[in-house]
Amino acid sequence: MSKLDIKSGLVEMGHGSGGRASATLIEKLFVRHFDNELLDQGNDQALFNVPAGRMVISTDGHVITPLFFPGGDIGSLSVHGTINDVAMSGATPLYLSASFILEEGFPLAELDRIVISMAKASRDAGVPVVTGDTKVVERGKGDGVFITTTGIGIVPDGINISGDLAEPGDSIIVSGSIGDHGIAILSSREGLQFSTAIESDSAALHTLVAGMVAAVPAIHCLRDPTRGGLATTLNELARQSNVGMRIQETSIPVKAEVKGACELLGLDPLYIANEGKLVCIVPSKDADQLLAVMQKHPLGQNAAIIGNVCKDAHQMVVMETAFGGNRVVDWLAGEQLPRIC
Amino acid sequence: MKYVDEFRDGDTARALARVIRAEINPERNYRLMEFCGGHTHAIFRFGIVDLMPDNIRFIHGPGCPVCVLPAGRIEAAIRLVEEEDVILCTYADLMRVPAGKKDSLQKAKARGGDIRMIYSPTDALSLARENPQREVVFFAIGFETTTPPTAAAIKIAEAEEISNFSVFCNHVETPPAMMHILTAGDAKIDGILGPSHVSTIIGSNAYADCCDKYRVPLVIAGFEPLDVIQSVLMLVRQINAGVARVENQYTRAVSETGNEKAKVLMHEVFEQRPQFEWRGLGVLPNSAVQIRSEFADFDAEKRFGMKEIATADIKGCICPAVLRGMNNPDECKLFGTACTPEDPKGACMVSSEGACAAYYSYGRYRSAEATA
């Protein structure tokens, strides 16, 4: 096995060729950090037993700029993002796969940092990366590194969560303050000179979800408000379930720093991305009990009931403003910010 | 948030709304045009309409620089990118504005055009310094608020002899557009909420002619919701008293004469353009500025011999009438069918703050409320 100069080496075309250089990179970097039994099988696939019941699968590509940001990096984000997509079905995530597209010339030291962070996120979550792939594209044809992760999980019996199950009268709960991720990313971008103490909320939500579905199996919908923010997620759910939503601005948790940054930049926190929050729609009779369960979890401490589902053929999301009026919370037209996840 | 929350206090708003209700004449309508997109945004974002009596109607004016930029100017910018291979620098809001033939800057970028999104004209200058072998063009748009920074960028480029930097100037002027809307005899506007940021530059005196000539009261209003409501009350009082003068609600930022330094800078670099096309209003005389011949080297139109591209009329679009308060957006044949926020045709649908786009969202809510 040849040596890998992690300290000062760069990604070369050979690292993706499938030859010896590829094997070295996989061995010395990926396998070393991800280190688990299934990956150690050393095959092009991971072999495992399948438990009885219903499975879910989800995939997510990560192309974020910058790669390192306050509160996380592309590695931890790629683990959290896919775990969350799996968990939003109420499932217990089991395994992840990871595909790396590396740009020729990318420093191996940075790749090492990313993979260490990814491995830590996966270990902390108890969801191992069991198979993967690496390709290298020529300099100028990528943007450092792109990571696609796929996750599978098992849905417990009796749980039936889907975006089309919201019913008039249901309560809408958000698990914590919104907009942290998008503002953290923005503050670390070149060209925008402002500093903030805000960190990305990037986190794996599956243990929060596990507690929620155990306490209230009747949850109707779960979704993580990532790109497009809370506003887009509520509109998606309203359309899928053919209902309307009425929310109260004063109930929605937003940190003062996020509010301030949004004010300065002319952005709206409702449309800013989150990576460690979820929206839950639940029969109103169960809402208080569920809220109490969520608030006991570290990732749900600031959970709040923000409104109700209602009958509305126009599928509108309308917010009662702190000011005392009403405002339509529409779909995001175009893009508010480029590449944030 | 200190200095923000004070201007968004719901109790004060409701108290002001009660005063307005007490003072209005129920026998008449009050059609108030807010000129700026910023006011339109505040009106919708804070739900101000819900606090107002029914006979106060807001007419959303043309004060969104993105919306009023005609397709021809965007098409010309795209040609510059594709035929002259320049780096075109633009604000992000312009990217999806429709040019002719279903094109846009976003689409041109996808085809390989080197279009960069920037946050300030100085970012364009930096790009020019970093790419001395490339031509860098700043796609300048906006009312008097954004004109001085463009002038400053040109002055810096001159001082530093940055020879690969130029400006595609599309800066427009507020008072002429306002006058034009009022000139049409059938305009139904009883009062104007005057621009806030623009007025910090040009000052409140700039609107005196407008009020005198067309006998329309104007109140310069801040962008916070309490500013808007207080300004509505001031307009109601003027209308009830039958007077028409410029009043300044936004005294914490706007003076009678404005920002003298910025005005001098603008005058030094720019001169009046004989005519300019506005999306939705047509060609208006003396309604925009162009770069003075002393700075011709920095004028992309001269540097690249850019040609005027006339915009084909959008058949059936009633933007001009909507902007004058003569028609509601839903009276347009294109509204909600051929012209939607996803595929806008007229100026008023382009930005989410445009009259038609706002009506599209809000109107659906209103009819939903009626059927609920």
Image (cartoon, grey):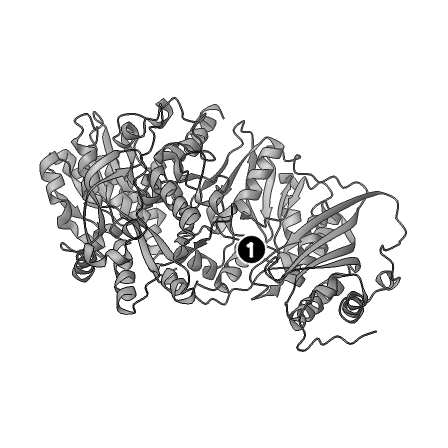
Quadrant of the rendered structure where residue B332 is?
A: top left
Q: Amino acid at mark 1?
A: Ile
Determine the secondary structure under disc 1: loop
Q: Position of residue A108 (x, y in %)?
A: 68, 71
- Mark 1 Cα within 10 Å, few/some/many (few <14, many 20+)? many
In the displayed structure, does residue A275 sit left or right of residue B296? right
Which part of the image, by quadrant, shows the C terminus of chain A? Answer: bottom right
Q: Position of residue A263 (x, y in %)?
A: 40, 55
Q: Residue at x 69, y 38 (%)?
A: A162
In the displayed structure, does residue B227 sit left or right of residue B344? left
Q: In this figure, which residue is indicated by the disc labeled 1?
A: A340
Q: Position of residue B45 (x, y in %)?
A: 39, 43
Number of residue marks: 1
Q: Position of residue B119 (x, y in %)?
A: 40, 57
* Above or below for B159 versus A238: below
Residues B359 and A135: in front is: A135
Chain under numbered label 1:
A
Q: Residue at x 25, y 58 (%)?
A: B151
Q: Residue at x 29, y 34 (%)?
A: B58
Residues A45 and B227: in front is: A45
* Residue A322 seen: no
Which part of the image, by quadrant, shows the N terminus of chain A? Answer: bottom right
Residues A45 and A210: in front is: A45
* Residue B4 seen: yes
In the displayed structure, does residue B26 sit left or right of residue A311? left
Quadrant of the rendered structure where residue A13 is?
A: bottom right
Quadrant of the rendered structure where residue A6 is?
A: bottom right
* Above or below for A97 versus B329: below
